[in-house]
Image (spheres, grey):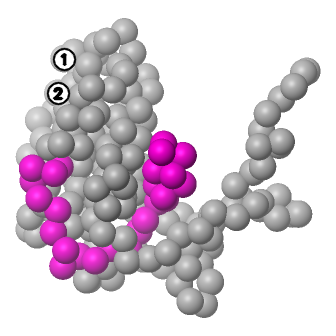
Amino acid sequence: MIRDLIVKNRSYRRFHEDQPVARSELLELVDLARLSASAANMQPLKFFVSCDEATNVKIFDCLGWAAYLTDWPGPAPGERPSAYIVILGDTVISRNFWCDHGIAAQSILLGAVEKGYGGCMIASIKKQQLMQALGIPERYEILLVIAIGRPAERVTIEPVGPQGDIRYWRDDQGVHHVPKRSLDEIVIERF
């Protein structure tokens, strides 16, 4: 059921790094993005996939991991993703990527959850450094990086508290808590 996949599709930031993700599985996930909606059907997205350790290290070094967890530098060795998908915009096809990369990323992550993986969309990227590290030609713009692997953490959804704080946090047991606004709060009946 789609609701179950969406509820399981959390932003995981710690993984079982020793459990690989096959390149063929990454290509199946990219294929889901390929089949997803695209503004004006321009299909300007391209994808760089990585599941080898050396390339993964290059990608990891260019990412920011959790803005609200200010004392956490990101996953430790052994807890890093086993794979990445870098979503690129091909500027020869279009200069405006609209919401295509968000649609593609959600399709990829829902497919990953269905396969028993988890992931995280990352937009905090040292883009020039990553372009150089991967040898990405100038015609491409880095839009998002998706980290993928077997989750090594528990992420729970809970209601936003009375103070209205939406910042995610971790408890003493390492459980990651994500406050979500209620349905009543986000549906507007009239203005």
The residue sitting at the bottom extreme is 172
**Residue sitting nearer the eye, 140 or 35:** 35
Examine the structure image and report whether residue 143 is included in the region drawn in magenta.
Answer: no
What's the CA distance linking mark 2 and mark 1? Answer: 7 Å
Say whether residue 11 is left or right of residue 59.
right
At x 83%, y 29%, the residue is 188
Residue at numbered disc 1: 92
Q: In the rendered image, which residue does mark 2 sit on?
A: 139
Q: Is residue 123 left or right of residue 20?
A: right
Residue 60, quarter of picture? bottom left
Q: Looking at the image, do the residues carrying marks 2 and 1 touch, with CB atoms under 8 Å apart?
A: yes
> Where's residue 120, x and y in %?
40, 57
Q: Would you place residue 61 above or below residue 93 in this image?
A: below
> Which element type, helix, strand or loop, lies under badge 1?
loop
Q: Residue at x 36, y 48 (%)?
A: 109
Q: Position of residue 124 (x, y in %)?
A: 41, 54
Of 156 and 168, the residue lying toward us? 156
Res 149 quadrant in image? bottom left
- Amino acid, disc 2: Arg
Q: Which residues are magenta?
A: 1-26
- Residue shown at 36%/39% (left/top)? 107
Callout 1 crowding tier (Cα within 10 Å): few <14, some 14–19, many ≥20: few
Camera-nearest residue between 120 and 65: 120
Tell me the amino acid under the disc marked 1.
Answer: Val
Res. 53 visible in picture: yes
